[in-house]
Amino acid sequence: MTIRESIGQGFHYARTCRSLWLFGFVVGVASGGSSNSGGGGGGDGGAVGLAAGGGLLAASVTTITLLAIAIILGTAALVVVRFVAEGALIEGVVRARQGGTMTMREGFRAGWAHWGVLVRIGLLYLAAIIVSVALLAAPGVIALLAIGPLTAVLLGIPALVIAVPWLVTLDLVKTFAWRIAVIENRHALDAIGKARLFLHGRLIHGLKLIVATFAGTLVLGLLGALAIVPVALLLVWLTSVLRVFPVIVIACIVLLPAFYVFTAIVGTFRSSIWTIGYVTQVDS
């Protein structure tokens, strides 16, 4: 497939598969104290103040603990929702390409069935990134500490030359492994192994998909900007005849749905590009 064909098919599924927009929206979004003091006189006042201070400290610790738990649970929930949406998009585009459809309920079921393996692949990818960066940076850091900055820079240049294609390759393996895990119902390591084999001899294909994703997203961004400029100008004009609060209400009524649709289409488009890019190569 050419870059233009990939963009065209991505636009087609992003526009027509409206039951996937909620999942596309989630993927699109995922892809961005005070203190008091006082004093009292006398021994009893000091004791009361100490007790009050201890109570405040205990309350502060409890509040911080509850806040930390809420942040952890919220982050975990966002991770689950993000990968449920990714799995639903992959499955939905495959069904659409085969002439079928997928309801939002079926999308949630499909995403829930695969979110765990997608997370595991993502964690393995993150670990590979950390190890790779550490190994590539280690000679430069050692040279900086033992010899000097000039030697560190000289060692850093080849490390950078190696790092860019290697990190891009890791990202391609991860992205294709997600598709393989969902479409072929494989475990994380199995999907990563097959993704490595799939990418062998298809690196140019993967680079074309990167270009198609970037170019298509840029086109969508330009179209979104062209659509929003007249609305923004109208809202600015309304401030001259209405108060600020009604204009804000009108802006929310108009712009929030537009933001949802735009983000949903972008998220669906970006995921569709890679799913189509994998499936067409397997079928050919």
Image: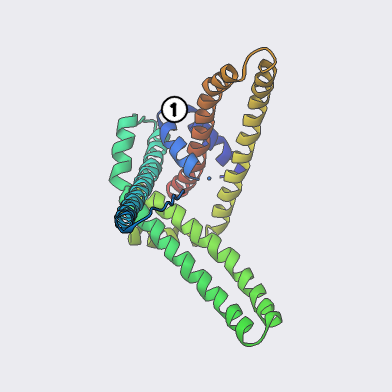
Left or right: where 36 falls relative to 148: left
Please say whether residue 19 is visible from this viewpoint.
yes
Q: Residues within 10 Å of mark 1 (few under 14, many from 20)?
A: some
Please determine whether, in this image, residue 71 is positioned above or below residue 156: above
* Residue furthest front in the image: 42
* Count of residue discs: 1
SS of the residue under disc 1: helix
Q: Nearer the viewer, residue 198 or 164?
A: 164
Please determine whether, in this image, residue 282 is positioned above or below residue 265: below
Image spot of residue 162 (x, y percent): 60, 70
Quadrant placement of the N terminus: top right
Please say whether residue 197 is visible from this viewpoint.
no
Seen at 51% across and 33% down, the residue is 265
Please determine whether, in this image, residue 155 is positioned above or below residue 187: below
* Residue furthest bottom in the image: 146
Image spot of residue 74 (x, y percent): 36, 46
Q: Nearer the viewer, residue 21 or 200?
A: 21
Q: Nearer the viewer, residue 105 or 259?
A: 259
Image spot of residue 236 (x, y percent): 68, 21
Please determine whether, in this image, residue 111 is positioned above or below residue 118: above
Q: Nearer the viewer, residue 70 or 75?
A: 70
Seen at 38% across and 57% down, the residue is 121
Image spot of residue 14 (x, y percent): 50, 33
Q: In terms of image quadrants, where is residue 27?
A: top left
Q: Which residue is mark 1?
A: 18
Q: Amino acid at mark 1?
A: Arg
Left or right: where 77 falls relative to 271: left
